[in-house]
Image (tube, rainbow, N blue to C red):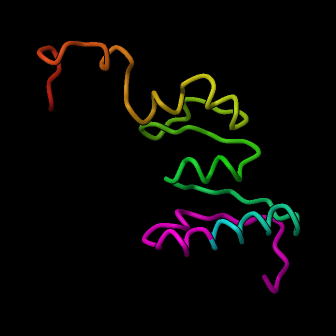
Amino acid sequence: MVAAPTIMMLDEPSLGLSPRLAEEVFSCIRWLSRERGVTVLLVEQNTKRALELADRAYVIALGRIVSEGKPRELLADGTLLEAYLGSSKAREAPASQMRVR
């Protein structure tokens, strides 16, 4: 922070942390973004917390961007659910038709 960066890239900053410490990390990220005006590129598996911080979000599946937009838009269109749980057709298929590979 001594160099006063205008952009920070963070990869899984909450990985392996207790919920309390993860909350502190997310509070610091929020402060950097909102109060200091630092642009934060955040890669985070904790979707709920990441979307609370984000102005814009990207859903990546198998290395490809499958959707992008404001967090509310992504939550409303089901893209996140699809990315995490797979195809809606797979969820609707009878168990006898599903195979694990």
* Quadrant housing the N terminus: bottom right
Using the image, determine if residue 5 lies above or below residue 12.
below
Whole-percent x, y for residue 70 in the image: 73, 35
Q: Nearer the viewer, residue 83 or 53?
A: 53
Quick check: 57 left or right of 91?
right
Residue at 66% x, 63% y is: 9
Where residue 77 appears, as percent x and y from the top left, is: 60, 22
Residue at x-position 54% and y-position 25%: 78
x then y, percent, for residue 87? 38, 21
- Residue 73 or 6: which is nearer the viewer? 73
In the rendered image, the vertical position of residue 14 relative to residue 73, given as above or below: below
Q: Does residue 59 sit above or below 13 in this rendering?
A: above
Quadrant holding the C terminus: top left
Rendered residue at 55%/69% (across/down) = 22
Magenta part of the chain: 1-23
Relative to the observer, which residue lies in front, 93 or 9?
93
Choose top left, top right, bottom left or bottom right for residue 2. bottom right
Most extreme residue toward the bottom, as rendered?
A: 2
Q: Residue at x 14, y 24 (%)?
A: 99
Q: Give the image quarter of residue 37.
A: bottom right
Q: Quadrant of residue 32?
A: bottom right
Task: Confirm whether the magenta stretch covers residue 18.
Answer: yes
Total tally of numbered discs in the picture: 0
Q: Quick check: 30 left or right of 85?
A: right
Residue 11: in magenta span: yes
Q: Is residue 71 left or right of residue 32?
A: left
Report whether 2 appears left or right of 16: right
